[in-house]
Image (spheres, rainbow, N blue to C red):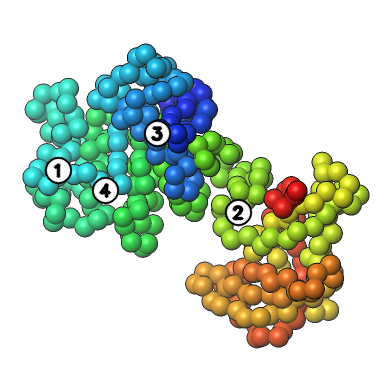
Amino acid sequence: MSNLVFERVSHAYGNLRAVDDVSLSVDAGELVCLLGPSGCGKTTLLRLAAGLEVLQQGRVLIGDEVMADGQRDVPPEDRSVGLVFQDFALFPHLSVQENVAFGVRKAGRSERAARARAALKQVAMEDYGEAYPHTLSGGQQQRVALARALAPQPNLMLLDEPFSGLDVQLRQEVRDETLHVLKRSGAATLMVTHDPEEAMFMADRIALMHQGRIQQIGRPEELYYKPVSAFVAAFFGEINRLEASVHDSQVETPLGVLDAQGFGEGAAVEVLIRPEAIKLLPPGEHAGSGQVPGTVVTAKLLGRTSLVHLSVADPRQELDLHLHVRVPGRFLPKEGQTFSIDLDPHQAFVFESRKRA
């Protein structure tokens, strides 16, 4: 059953259409990430679900009950929604226990205290009930904010960039803990993020937004391996771009031949290739799919992967192609070293050229 449903929702600020005809649902126990660049409408959509913005067009339902439809507008406190904001929004004058209990409004004092303790235990903060927010680390404050949102046992959790204020190492730790807490709660969760790796880590499904519209929605692997547009493909990381044209339903590139079914003969297309799709093989070991060898310009170790800058001659152009290749682990070939090229076609995508007249 869907705990949250947007039906053809649109919202504008003056002449700016922040959300444009969006339909989306989030099921019980499911975590959906709204992903996209700044200003794409994802936070506006979250605020409409929470009741923090007055709906202008469409319908918002939570648990099969209409929350807003242009005539009815249920206030936030009556929507059974837990909210975790970017800045955590903890009350500095209240203890951790009091902060968490604050979210449990419709209960007696003893039940509020019991629910607060249970929520703090969920996030491993039960020993900090008497502490105050300013004495906690950023990660601990995030856990308290999550506990406060969970304490009322909402049907829907809404998280707005909840990890953006944390340093990289702490962010990885806290988001892993948060994912497991949310899954155990069974609530439907809608989370806003601009970080594609974070969305892939957290989400059952990702809704990628651009200019107020959802460009593609699906499982993380669907968006990564089957993008519907160049925007979607490029949003999930660095991309090598090549211009080409279609002949006999194929695109011929210096890296190999790619399928181009659905494009007309001679159509101008853009080929997008992920850096990890390019495999470097010693000369003579394997012919590879590439038509010409690649020459190393430089190579850098980036921790878990190495980035190789590669120069590949393009018979169609005066200038060589400059490509980036990602290789797992430590791989630092010398400048000028040559390799045969093999290409993984599952990570190479053909779209209509943006330069088309």
- CA gap, disc 4 and disc 3: 24 Å
> Does dot 1 land on a helix, a strand or a loop?
loop
Q: Earlier in the sequence, mark 4 or mark 3?
A: 3
Which residue is at the far right?
248
Asked whether residue 248 is in view, the answer is yes
> Does dot 4 land on a helix, a strand or a loop?
loop
> Does dot 3 land on a helix, a strand or a loop?
strand
Q: Nearer the viewer, mark 3 or mark 2?
A: 3
Q: Left or right: 55 with respect to 104?
A: right
Q: Earlier in the sequence, mark 3 or mark 1?
A: 3
Asked whether residue 121 is in view, the answer is no
- Amino acid carrying mark 2 in the image: Ala
In the foreground, 117 or 151: 151
The crowd level at tag 3 (other Cα within 10 Å; few <14, some 14-19, many 20+) is few
Q: Left or right: 42 with respect to 244?
A: left
Q: Which residue is mark 3?
A: 13
Q: Earlier in the sequence, mark 2 or mark 1?
A: 1
Q: Earlier in the sequence, mark 4 or mark 2?
A: 4
Q: Which residue is mark 4?
A: 87
Residue 158: quarter of image = top left
Tell me if label 4 and label 2 are in contact, CB under 8 Å.
no
Q: Left or right: 20 with respect to 150?
A: right
The crowd level at tag 4 (other Cα within 10 Å; few <14, some 14-19, many 20+) is some
- Amino acid carrying mark 1 in the image: Phe
Q: Nearer the viewer, mark 4 or mark 3?
A: 3
Q: Which residue is depicted at the point 62% across and 81% down? A: 298
Q: Which residue is mark 2?
A: 234
x, y percent for residue 297: 66, 81
- CA gap, disc 3 and disc 2: 28 Å
